[in-house]
Image (cartoon, rainbow, N blue to C red):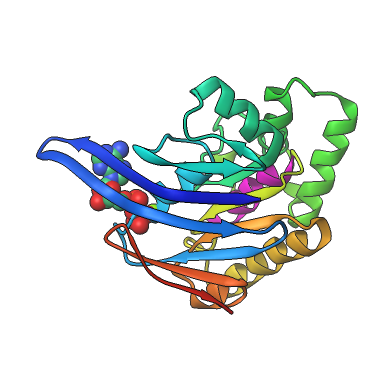
Amino acid sequence: MLKVERLTKTYRAAGGPLTVLREVSFELEAGASLAVVGPSGSGKTTLLGLCAGLDRPTSGNVVLAGKPIGALDEDKRALVRNAHVGFMFQNFQLVPTLTALENVLVPLELAGKGGLSTEVAGRELLERVGLADRRDHYPVQLSGGEQQRVALARAFMNSPKILFCDEPTGNLDGDTAQAMIELIFGLNRERRTTLVLVTHDHELAKRCHRIIRLKGGLVISDETV
Ligand code: ADP
Ligand code: MG
């Protein structure tokens, strides 16, 4: 489902080039779940973005759903993302001028698949994350945890084969975090969605089949649970 080959990312920064990922390699089967852990600044978000085709590596390659995406331009990567990928950002990135339901429908609108049946699917997903009664609320009218659940529903809207989540429980208290974990793994079981999760949350990491630990852009451990 996902193959990462000697992935390296160097940013051009004011003080000179900054290498934040060094020769990271791993392979993930369909339906598997991976937790990427490590201290702040170790390259987790950068790795997630490269795997999902949001950004391009400096060297190395990513094969996503059988397609090498490392060298593709933004438009071609967007096509692959639309077809296969769900992404839940660390800061949600909901559209402030759209309601919860409209936010959930964005991926299909982008894919040109709007319409009544998708609206029904969007309502069902909002129900699934426990927000049926918040459908017409705007992001500012929602709590952090509710926004995070809208972001999860949106990430599932295009029925992704692979879901990337950056700190999905980062802004949640204990009970809400547990509910989010159950939701993600419930959807993973029901739909066989491959999961790649960046997290500081020990409970969440423990639920994954595999844990990769990063430090200073290097993989320092890779364990199958
Ligand atoms: P993590 O998610 O593990 O906290 P990140 O992947 O966000 O780490 O960042 C890794 C390192 O790369 C950090 O030192 C960060 O400052 C740097 N970095 C991230 N994005 C950029 C960028 N666009 N330009 C320059 N440096 C960046
Ligand atoms: Mg991060």
Q: Main secondary structure of the magenta part?
A: helix
Note whether 28 is above or below 150 in the view shown.
below
Using the image as rendered, state which of residue 191 and residue 153 is in the foreground. 191
Using the image as rendered, state which of residue 78 and residue 107 is in the foreground. 78
Instruction: Please give left or right for residue 137 compared with residue 14 in the image.
Output: right
Residue 144 belongs to the span the image colors magenta: yes
Residue 136 belongs to the span the image colors magenta: no
Instruction: Please give left or right for residue 70 compared with residue 161 in the image.
Output: left
> Where on the picture, by quarter, is residue 64?
top right
> Dividing the image into four equal quarters, which quarter contains ligand 2?
bottom left
The residue depicted at 66 percent of the width and 35 percent of the height is 103
The residue depicted at 66 percent of the width and 41 percent of the height is 66
Whether residue 143 can be seen here: no
The residue depicted at 76 percent of the width and 59 percent of the height is 187
Q: Which residue lies furthest to the left in this view?
A: 15
The residue depicted at 66 percent of the width and 32 percent of the height is 82
Read off the magenta span.
Answer: 143-157
Note whether 5 is above or below 32 in the view shown.
above
> Where on the picture, by quarter, is residue 216?
bottom left
